[in-house]
Amino acid sequence: MADANVLLFPICIKKFKEIYKMYIPAIDTETRASDYTEALGKARRLIQSSFILDEINKTMISSDEIPDILKERELEEYMDAQVVYIDYYDSDCYDLGELTLQIPQYLIDDIKKESIDYTRVFVDSLDEILRRKRIFNEIRYWTGKTVNINNGDYFGQIKSIDYKKNTPWNFTVSLKTGISDSIKLHPGVIEEIEEMPVAMNELGTFRTVNQDGLISVSGKLWWKKGHIDVYLEYDSSVGIEDQKSYELLAEFNKKKYEWDEVIRQNIATQLIKKDIILRLFEDYEEDDLKKRIKHILEELMNRTELWFIDISSSKNVYMDYNCSNGMGKYNVGVTKNLGDDSFVFVLNDVTIFSDLDDEEDDDDEELNTYHLD
């Protein structure tokens, strides 16, 4: 027989890339952790805090209700998540203590006027300050070293940390993100940080990533008005600063815009022959066929953009192109070898927003092989 003093709270846990995200239905809260054990610990602390503040009813939510709750709260990403039950005893609650604070009367009046749960605000604020203080201590230790922040949101070398002695949790971090680039980060955007080897060169800033067991060098390459993702084959026999794949990226970088222009022109010329692509332009009113074709060609050229590249040690390059115009979208994969001037591209999928039942073309179709003469 179950102990009446034991409460069970379901937690939806799912791994996203290199982090664990979790959702706690009882308190309608999402959070994340770097590993499974930390995720369970965070969930227990959040439940404990909410239970002490009478924010949780002593009602067990059954697993049968979880899919309906996720759907109602538009959290479909957790539909296939693992559901773990946190067993919670009344005796787990810490004794409540008291603090005497002096605050301005106008704040007291406004709090009462707005019916603000000041106890919740106070506890949350202290939790946040303690979290920032822990991060502050980690960053002080890693100053001068290269780090990964928030599992890839930011990475580079910590140059300095600015703070006032009496409020160290309000620090600012100067992070060198490239040979001549740096940013300043405030504690509110830093959730987790870990030391990680990082390479910086004229092409960009790079780190290693694990993609389903395959280690690659990942970084950013400047592309026209911003950066695109780059993946390079990783050689474990040398350090990240000495990867030979940087030479291949440099070779690609010399002719990237020339290749891009020819590739987009040929993609547009071939795609305009496909009926499913023409459906992306059904709202364009033009009776003159020549003008209509010219307009569509220009749209295909201008909207087809390179999203990322992947270069292998054998000089094979995969280029991922995408296009969206409000009516729908498509993806084209381009492969070429750095040793010659030919390339092959394949229309991978097409989505028509007005008819989601017809998201993809019948089959992946190789469009053609082209030479850059």
Image: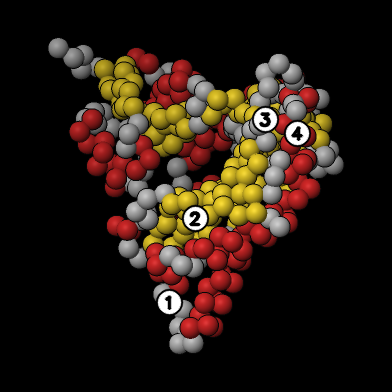
* Residue position marked by numbered label 1 in the rendering: 283
Name the residue furthest right: 180
Q: Which of marks 2 and 3 is nearer the N terminus?
A: 3
Q: Type of residue at label 4?
A: Tyr
Q: Is residue 54 visible?
A: no
Q: Are marks 4 and 1 in contact (CB under 8 Å)?
A: no
Q: Position of residue 145 (x, y in %)?
A: 77, 24
Q: Is residue 62 visible?
A: yes
Q: Type of residue at label 1?
A: Asp
Q: Are marks 4 and 2 in contact (CB under 8 Å)?
A: no
Q: Which of marks 4 and 2 is nearer the N terminus?
A: 4
* Residue position marked by numbered label 3 in the rendering: 313
161 lies left or right of 31: right
Position of 173 relative to 321 (above/below) = above
* Residue position marked by numbered label 4 in the rendering: 246
Disc number for residue 83: none
